[in-house]
Structures are given as structure tokens and as C-alpha cells.
Image (cartoon, helix red, strand yellow):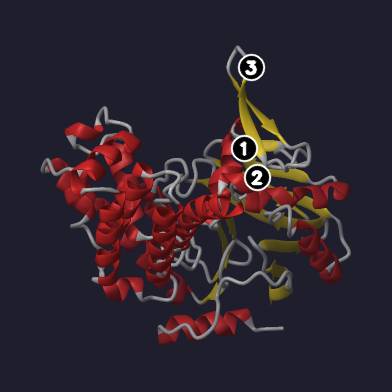
Amino acid sequence: MADLLALSSRIIDSGHTDQPVNRVTNELSEIAPGIAMVESFSHCVALDTDAGLVCFDASGVMTGQAVRESLRGWRPAPVSHLVYTHGHADHVGGSMFFADDRPVVVGHENVAVRMDRYDYTSTWNLIINARQFGGVSGDLNFSVGDTGTGLEVQANPKARRFLPAATMRPDETFRDSHEVTVGGHRIEMHHARGETDDHLWAWLPEQKAVVTGDFLIWNFPNAGNPQKVQRYPIEWAAALRRMVAMGPELLLPAHGLPIEGADRIARVLGDVAGALEDIVRDVVAMMNSGANLDTIIHTVKVPADTLAKPYLRPLYDEPEFVVRGIWRQFGGWWDGAASRLKPSPDAHLASVLADLAGGADVLLRRAEQAIADGDERLASHLADLAGWAAPDDPTIHGGRAAIYLARRKMESSLMSKGIFAAAARESQQVVDAATAV
């Protein structure tokens, strides 16, 4: 079993990462006396008390059972309390495997609102999560039909829900803060908006430990996810500053490695907070100067040495997407270009431009030249235009797929890699359909 604290200390102190820090092993490590962490798709942090285990998060539906089994191998005691740091599916979807213990489930009051939203938009969330990992909606085996009173999703009966119906809902909720005492152990919970509007972080005063949930993920903060609802970088940074003020000597995240040492924890949380504060400051300053989104996106940057820190690498989300999220939070969805307020359909614009250029094949050739020249942004624009202008042409779409696969290899973040892989798969489906005829 790896010594996770020694590993994280070495990585933080050296500034170099020589092995993965976000691991899905479903193995349990005792981090401190009476405190354990199961590394999974989202971790489960457990506190052993005389009244049973207090668990923070249940991981997802695909990993929750393995997590619960690892906990049983550590302590046979039942789970007395299950605390949701927030309502994302990878944190609550595995709760069904904790249900036999009949735990008291605790979460912010907006967790239930999130679960209702997931029920309402279940198939949409399946689509965007498939795309995030390189899939396309065709993988989900559903159709949309008009019932006469509105559009209705006609799903394959075997199609899964985004959030399992058996997911346990909170029994105890709160708005700002909440405190419980279990087996003589006091646990403080504090709400703060960050990755979500239903997020909490917990303070264990006896252990001088902070349970951060996704406020720290050992990647650049997921504060700008291009397919998800609003994130809150200002409040996120403030929450990190408040955690530092508590003087924690042990940090237990929901992704990545635990961290020990007050100075080390303060440095990590301070660096993450500073990165968010700087990007918000620069974006808002440019907005106040009247700049449009295009100018801001291509101007506001995070220094390379900041992104090189082991806990700030842009391997999941990335700063450019956070810039867009800040714009959306304060400026709405319109980017400032008049033509995009009420735009022409993409396919119509693409057809006109293809006619002007001399055909969709001309656009594709120019896209191929752009990717060869290292201008992957221009290449993607032109490849999309070619594909929209010739939606059924396997040659055009074969070229578009190749461009997006090439671009995928150039990207660092999972968000970009997944969306570009999905674009390549969309075009490859056109090629495959033509070949099958």
C-alpha cells in the first residue's frame, strides 16, 4: 500500500510529478489514526467513531460497491453518517451500496435541487458526459419524437439513467453551516459555491483536518467546464482562503492525494486560490474596459510556471474555459459580436462560404494546410465549415475526422480531448455509413 502522505509531500516539495496523482484503485489507505481514504473515481474519506463510520462521499455507481467493500475490510462498523460534499454523480451515485447501513445522509440544501435537475435532464447529461470522454449521442441508443404536446425522449429500456434511481437523498440539509457530533467526534460543515452551488467542505477540529471535496482536485480548478452549468471561481477562492485560516494539518480531497503539514497545505490552497483570483481580476478588468469575449480569451493567460505546479496542471479543465465561465457569470451568453446575436444556421453560412471558396473540398484543403502549419484553431473552423457544407460527403468528413484527431493529440485537458475526439467520431460515422452502403 502506497504511503500517500509521503508521496504527496515529495511531489509538492519537489514540484515534479513522476507518477499519477489521481488514481482509481478502490484501495483503502489509513491516512491518520481513525481516518481512511479509498482512492476511487471520487474518493471516499472515512472517519472511525464509536457510533460508526462517518463517510464523505460514496463515489459513483460503477465504483461505489468496491469502495464499500474496502471500507468493510478496514472496519466492520456500519456507516452512521454519509456526507455529500456535493451532488455530482461521481460523489453520490454509489450511495446505494451504503443503503443497508441506513446512514443519516447529510448535504447542502441544493443537493436535492440538483438531483431533481438530473432527473429532468437525464438524457442530456448522458449525452454531454459521453462527449466529455470522446463519445457521441449515438452511443446512447435513444431517439426524440414529437408526441403532439411536446418532444419526448424515447430511450432504449436498457438505457441507464444519469443518476441512478436508488441514489440516496439527504436526510439533513443546511444552508450556510451545519455541525454534527458522532461518537464524540465533532464535524463542522461549511457551504461555499465553487465547482457547484451545493458544495460543502468539512472541518474536523480534533484531527485538525479539512475535507475539501472538489475544492482541490490536483488539477487546474474545474471552474469553466464547457458543457456544464455555472461555476463560481470568486467564491471558490474565498473558500480556500477560509480553509487555510483554520490552520489544517491534514487535507483530504475527493480527487488526488492527501496532504500533511500546515505550511504545505497553506501553500497549495493559496496557490490555487491565487490562480483563480488572478484570472477573475484580469477578466473583469477587461470587461470593465469594454473588451469583447474574443479579445479577452486571447489575452488573459495564466503563467506557465503556475500551470506547471503538480496541483495546477490543466489536465482536466483549463484556464481558457474558466475565462469563458467568468464572462458568462457577469456578462451573459452573448460574446459581443453582433452577427452572433441572431446568427444564420451554421449549415447555411457554411454552404455560402463553400460556394465563395470554390467548394467544401477547398475549405478542407485549407484546413489541412492550417493543421500542418500548427494553426489548429483555424484548421478546426475550416474543417467544421467544410463538414457543415457537405454533411454526407465521406471524403470531407474523413478529412475532418483526421484534423480533429490530430488536434486532440495537441491538447492537455480532458475537456478538450474529449470534445475533439467526439467531433472526429461524428465525422467517422459519416464515413462508415457511406462505406456500409
- Mark 2 or mark 3: whose residue is earlier in sequence: 2
- Mark 3 or mark 1: whose residue is earlier in sequence: 1
426 vs 271: above or below: above
| x then y, percent, for residue 63 | 73, 60
- Which residue: 65% across, 45% down? 140
276 sits to left or right of 200: left
Q: Which mark is on residue 123? A: 1
Give neighbour class at mark 2: few <14, some 14-19, many 20+ (Cα, 10 Å).
Answer: some
Real-space Cα separation, disc 3 to disc 1, in angstroms: 17 Å
Residue in the foreground of this view, choosing between 267 and 232? 232
Q: Which element is circle 3 on?
A: loop
Front disc: 1 or 2 = 2
- Which residue: 38% across, 65% down? 407
88 sits to left or right of 195: right
| x then y, percent, for residue 263 | 43, 75
On the image, numbered disc 2 is attached to which residue?
140
Q: Which mark is on residue 147? A: 3
Residue in the foreground of this view, choosing between 301 and 376? 376
Residue 32 visible to the viewer: no
Q: Identify the amino acid type marked 2.
A: Leu
Q: Which element is circle 1 on?
A: helix
- Which residue: 20% across, 33% down? 339
Q: Which mark is on residue 160? A: none
